[in-house]
Amino acid sequence: MKPEVSVNGTDIVTDIHPCYVIDNLNYILTNSPSIICVLIYGFLALLSVTTVCGNFLVIISIVYFKQLHTPTNYLILSLAAADLLVGIIVFPFSMVFSLSSCQYHEGLFCKVRGSFDISLSTCSILNLCCISVDRYYAVCKPLTYSIKINHCVVVIMILMSWGVSALIGIVVIIAGLNSETCEGKCLITVLIANTIGLILSFYFPVIIMLCIYLKIFLVALRQARRIQNTKSGAAVSKMERKATKTLAVVLGVFLLCWTPFFLCYTFLPYTNDSVPGSVMETLNWLTLSNSMLNPFIYAFFYSWFRSAFKMIISGKIFRGDFVNSKLH
């Protein structure tokens, strides 16, 4: 009979992670890993290294090259920092304390892992929300953009994103510790973790971003019709639309990676249905893989990021002063 794993009192996982065994009711890493386990952890380690390296390239590019010192790129820098921490902290924690093992026997390290996971994912989506506001003013209010979105405003946005994310992470840990005093399903804990927390950290910001990008899309269409006969205006509009399109792709990839897990995590605790542990693990790693994808999106759409990446990887920036280089 397969053991069932519970989340907040609801049995939803019905199989064992291939890298773990049950020993005296403890869910522990096996001493003799199977080939599947080795392949899984090899792939996850590669994912972690790629995530760290990719986002590190984005951070170095924006910090080093003056051409990239723009309000939008500072927000991208904050997003890359959150993704970098996912690669450094959440990936290793999730490999040692997997979702399945934490659902079976939740301890302090599992709560810490979950807190970092939730905090950094919240930070990512709040940074994306700030980026959507930046794009709104760039496309819809271009005459007031430099006034509304200046370096001071961007710093405040970034501090608020990280501050709110840290607060949510702390609340999750406190709620998790309080749940230990609950017998069976703790309604308050489920309400905080599976309803209020998810609404504030995912659903509400996503709805805001979707509304903003819809407004941007409609305004961009009107602007394209008005300035199609003006070369200079068309060039500026084309540049802003390209930046908006790129960041909209970043948002779309984020939604594709995160929505399945959030929907599953939101509704399953309120049902009697079970889901294979492998499915939950796959959804969990799909969410984390989003942190790896963003740098590739920038490199694909932005030629100046590609140029910056090439100069960094080749070591060219260490052989001279290229701070003021014109990136193409």
Image (cartoon, rainbow, N blue to C red):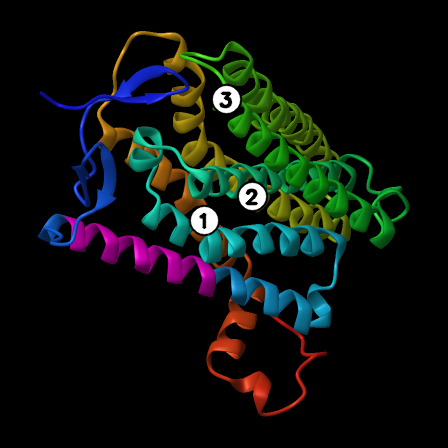
Q: Quadrant of residue 227?
A: top right
Q: Return the residue at label 2.
A: 120
Q: Nearer the viewer, residue 41 or 142?
A: 41
Residue at 13% x, 52% y: name it: 33
Q: CA distance from mark 2 to mark 1?
A: 9 Å
Task: Give the structural element (helix, strand or loop) at label 2.
Answer: helix
Q: In the figure, residue 109 lies in which quadrant?
A: top left
Q: Categorize mark 2 by other alpha carbons within 10 Å: few (<14), some (14-19), many (20+).
A: many
Does residue 43 show up magenta in the picture?
yes
Q: Amino acid at mark 1?
A: Val
- In the rendered image, residue 112, in percent from the top left (x then y), is placed at 50, 42
| x and y, in percent, of residue 231 in the image | 73, 52
Residue 90, labelled with which disc?
A: 1
User: Which residues lie in the magenta part?
Assistant: 37-53
Q: Nearer the viewer, residue 288 or 4?
A: 4
Amino acid, disc 2: Leu
Pointers 3 and 2 in contact (C-beta within 8 Å): no
Residue shown at 87% from the left, 42% from the top: 148
